[in-house]
């Protein structure tokens, strides 16, 4: 999960470099909402480990962005 967070941070920095004027803050809120939805899916599907782990990795990646 830590690697996913670091990769998300790297992608966020790359995206920020492409837009020197900055990004709209609404994009950050949208990514936060997606991360929370992925974390909720991981909580619901915690009995089946494969989907839960994928959702948690996705959540950390989006939080990094």
Image (cartoon, rainbow, N blue to C red):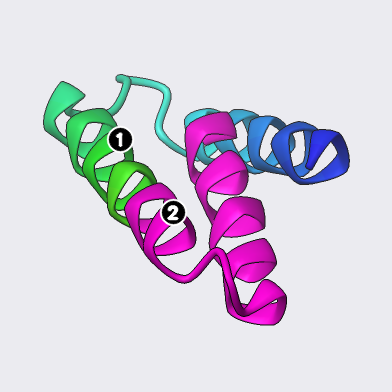
The answer to whether 33 appears left or right of 48 in the picture is left
Image location (x, y in percent) of residue 25: 18, 22
The mark nearer the N terminus, 1 or 2, is: 1
Q: Does residue 26 sit above or below 25 in this rendering?
A: below
Mark 2, Cα crowd under 10 Å, few <14 / some 14-19 / many 20+, is some
Q: Please name the residue shown 52% across and 40% down the image.
A: 15
Q: Quadrant of residue 28?
A: top left
Mark 1, Cα crowd under 10 Å, few <14 / some 14-19 / many 20+, is some
Image location (x, y in percent) of residue 54: 64, 69
Q: Nearer the viewer, residue 61 or 56?
A: 56
Cβ atoms under marks 1 and 2 closer than 8 Å: no
Q: Gap in Å between the C-alphas at discs 1 and 2?
A: 16 Å
| Residue at the limit of the structure toward the front, as seen here | 47
Q: Please name the residue shown 48% across and 59% down the image.
A: 42
Q: Does residue 18 sit above or below 45 in this rendering?
A: above
Q: Does residue 11 sit above or below 40 in this rendering?
A: above
| Disc nearest the viewer among 1 and 2 | 2
Image location (x, y in percent) of residue 58: 57, 57
The residue carrying mark 1 is 32
Report helix, strand or loop for mark 1. Answer: helix
The residue carrying mark 2 is 43
The answer to whether 33 appears left or right of 63 in the picture is left
Kindly report the secondary structure that dominates the magenta region of the rendered protein: helix
Report helix, strand or loop for mark 2. Answer: helix
Q: Quadrant of residue 35?
A: top left
Range of residues picked out in magenta: 38-65
Q: Please name the residue shown 71% across and 35% down the image.
A: 5
Image location (x, y in percent) of residue 7: 77, 43
The answer to whether 1 appears left or right of 38 in the picture is right
């Amino acid at each position: 999960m830590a690697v996913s967070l670091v990769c998300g941070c790297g992608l966020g920095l790359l995206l920020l470099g492409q837009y020197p004027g900055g990004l709209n803050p609404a994009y950050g809120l949208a990514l936060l909402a997606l991360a929370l939805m992925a974390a909720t899916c991981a909580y619901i599907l915690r009995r089946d480990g494969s989907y839960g782990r994928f959702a948690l990795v996705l959540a950390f990646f989006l939080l990094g962005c």
